């Protein structure tokens, strides 16, 4: 997951709303949204190379989502970042407890941003730079930089989610539209992450098209105050070709 916005205790119905895009190489083997055969309490897409995930829901309507942190000089060695999501969703520890435990070994992973949610709280944990915090109620955003970093695509997705939570609509179409946004900001607004201006431009939209790399999945997670809701996924191939969509109910 390389871009997300989160509404926490801000919507009149949903205690948590997460909308996000996973950007990845198209050749990386991936399973569509489903219940995991070896962990039926987990719902989400799955990386078939490492066995982990990028966003999902576990028992008790616990949610996890991860992004990488863009730094071409940082080491990419270590365990798969998808395990950060899978390990939390397979378990039963509270978000705060799991975040504390994970903080002790966070430096063994390649750079990441991680959100862990349960019925009581949402906790952020990052390792590049190291950081941990409990999120306040409201709208939050993450991409491949620091939490709430003012990257244009992060701001645009946060604004779209905020407008949706403040509206009376139950339609998810405004959220899907925001996740499909291909707006490219002016060069002066782009972050400088050390990859060069052309790549910064290419990676600047919420939805990225490419032959080898791009947006592979868009995900919407909705959880109400009783722990019920749904997880929705739309999938894409090279150059953004639609490959299918699914949804699962959260009981």
Image (spheres, rainbow, N blue to C red):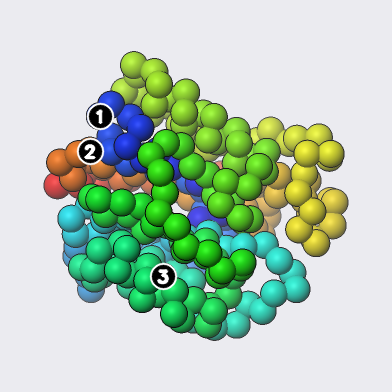
Q: Cα distance, mark 2 to mark 3? A: 24 Å
Residue located at (23% from left, 68% from top): 93
Q: Where is residue 42 shown, x and y percent of the image?
A: 25, 62
Q: Image check: 36 left or right of 239?
A: left
Marks 3,1: beta carbons within 8 A: no
Estimate how packed mark 1 is, as few (under 14), some (14 to 19) or many (20 or more) residues with alpha carbons within 10 Å. some
Q: Is residue 131 visible?
A: yes
Helix, strand or loop for disc 2: strand
Q: Where is residue 185 shown, x and y percent of the image?
A: 75, 35
Q: Cα distance, mark 1 to mark 2? A: 6 Å
Q: Where is residue 55 shown, x and y percent of the image?
A: 40, 56
Helix, strand or loop for disc 1: loop
Q: Earlier in the sequence, mark 3 or mark 1?
A: 1
Q: Which residue is mark 3?
A: 84
Q: Which residue is mark 1?
A: 13
Q: Cα distance, mark 3 to mark 1? A: 28 Å
Nearer the observer, 149 or 29: 149
Marks 1,2: beta carbons within 8 A: yes
Q: Image check: 39 left or right of 52?
A: left
Q: Where is residue 189 shown, x and y percent of the image?
A: 78, 39
Nearer the observer, 1 or 147: 147
Estimate how packed mark 2 is, as few (under 14), some (14 to 19) or many (20 or more) residues with alpha carbons within 10 Å. some
Q: Earlier in the sequence, mark 1 or mark 2?
A: 1
Residue that lies at the very extreme toward the top in this rendered image: 168
Nearer the observer, 238 or 165: 165
Residue 156 figure quarter: top right
Q: Which residue is mark 2?
A: 224
Estimate how packed mark 3 is, as few (under 14), some (14 to 19) or many (20 or more) residues with alpha carbons within 10 Å. many
Residue 90 figure quarter: bottom left
Q: Image check: 176 left or right of 172?
A: right
Q: Is residue 234 visible?
A: no
């Amino acid at each position: 997951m390389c871009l997300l916005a989160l509404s926490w205790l801000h919507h009149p119905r949903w205690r948590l709303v997460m909308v996000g895009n996973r950007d990845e190489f198209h050749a990386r083997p991936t399973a569509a949204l489903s219940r995991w055969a070896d962990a039926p309490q987990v719902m989400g897409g799955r990386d078939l190379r490492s066995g982990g995930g990028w966003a999902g829901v576990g028992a008790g309507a616990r949610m996890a989502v991860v992004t990488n942190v863009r730094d071409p000089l940082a080491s990419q060695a270590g365990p798969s970042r998808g395990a950060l999501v899978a390990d939390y969703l397979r378990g039963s520890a509270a978000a705060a407890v799991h975040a504390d435990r994970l903080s002790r070994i966070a430096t063994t992973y390649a750079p990441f941003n991680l959100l862990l949610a349960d019925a009581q709280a949402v906790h952020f944990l990052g390792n590049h730079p190291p950081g941990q915090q409990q999120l306040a109620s409201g709208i939050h955003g993450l991409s491949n930089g620091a939490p709430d970093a003012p990257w244009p695509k992060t701001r645009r997705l946060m604004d779209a989610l905020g407008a949706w939570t403040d509206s009376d609509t139950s339609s998810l179409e405004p959220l899907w539209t925001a996740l499909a946004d291909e707006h490219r900001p002016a060069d002066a607004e782009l972050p400088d992450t050390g990859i060069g201006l052309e790549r910064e431009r290419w990676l600047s939209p919420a939805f990225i098209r490419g032959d080898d790399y791009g947006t592979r999945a868009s995900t919407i997670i909705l959880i109400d105050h009783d722990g019920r809701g749904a997880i929705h996924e739309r999938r894409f191939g090279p150059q953004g070709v639609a490959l299918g969509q699914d949804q699962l109910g959260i009981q």
